[in-house]
Image (cartoon, grey):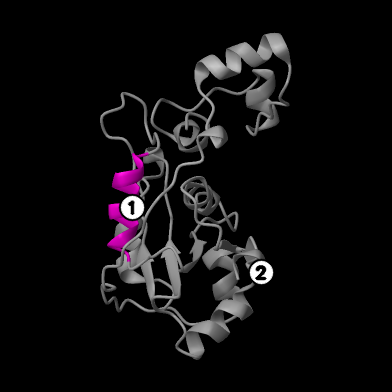
Amino acid sequence: MAAQIRAVVSAQWLAEAVKNKLVGPKLRILDGTWYPPKSKRVAREEFSQKHIPGASFFDIDECCDKSSPNDHMLPTSGDFSRYVGELGIGNDTHVVVYDTSDRGSFSAPRVWWMFRVFGLGSVSVLDGGLKNWLAEGHPVTSDYSKPERRDFQASLYQSWVKSFEDVLENIKTKQVQVVDARSAGRFWGTEPEPAKGEECSLFYRS
């Protein structure tokens, strides 16, 4: 089953699932929207006003290691298990994640990766996010029903997480190709880096 799950699903596919009332223990939809503080937008408040029917909100600021001085570090396996279990997700659930970025997708891939790194293979990103969902004329709602809690057992793939020391060592050994996903201007030093706690913390420090 897990081998058949696509990393990206279309809005039409998800709309059919919503229409056929398939959202439940076997299929969960998550709004994983995160905004940089400078945007002055509050993702959870926007979720309460408008979201895909049946969706729950995944808070990246909550599901993290709060003891770390750095932002958005991975939580422990136990904390992740408890958090997603409260969202009605079990190890046999197919999770579809989207966000509300004007770009179509920004923070949803981070949530997708978190599920993968904690052992869930059946997770997908909604192609084009809420922007594309609305463009295709699919419905949204402000209604929300908290899912019934399920048991999720996380198993961290430690090899998928690299430390600062690992990166320094790789500079010497060159065993792994490192990719810088920032904009060209930030890569070449012609644009300023965001302040601590903004865009850079969502992906580059985890």
Q: Is residue 136 above or below residue 19?
A: above
**x and y percent of residue 67 in the render?**
26, 29
Quarter residue 104 falls in: bottom right
In the image, what residue occupies the spot 56% across and 73% down?
Answer: 133
Q: Who is closer to the viewer here, 153 or 138?
A: 153
Please identify the residue farthest to the bottom as the structure is shown: 20
Asked whether residue 81 is drawn in magenta, I would say yes
- The kind of secondary structure the magenta stretch mainly shows is helix
**x and y percent of residue 83 in the render?**
30, 54
Going by the numbered disc 1, the residue's amino acid type is Ser
Label ID, residue 81? 1
In the image, what residue occupies the spot 45% across and 88% down?
Answer: 21
In the image, what residue occupies the spot 43% across and 80% down?
Answer: 23
Label ID, residue 121? none
Q: Is the residue marked by circle 1 packed among few (<14), some (14-19), or many (20+) residues within 10 Å?
A: many
Q: Secondary structure at mark 1?
A: helix
Q: Is the residue marked by circle 2 packed among few (<14), some (14-19), or many (20+) residues within 10 Å?
A: few
The residue wearing badge 2 is 4
Going by the numbered disc 2, the residue's amino acid type is Gln
Residues under numbered marks 1 and 2 in contact, where contact means CB atoms less than 8 Å apart: no
Q: CA distance from mark 1 to mark 2?
A: 24 Å
Q: Is residue 16 visible?
A: yes
In the image, what residue occupies the spot 32% across and 76% down?
Answer: 142
Residue 57 as seen in the image, left or right of residue 194:
left
Asked whether residue 67 is drawn in magenta, I would say no
Name the N-terminal-most of marks 1 and 2.
Answer: 2
Region in magenta:
75-87
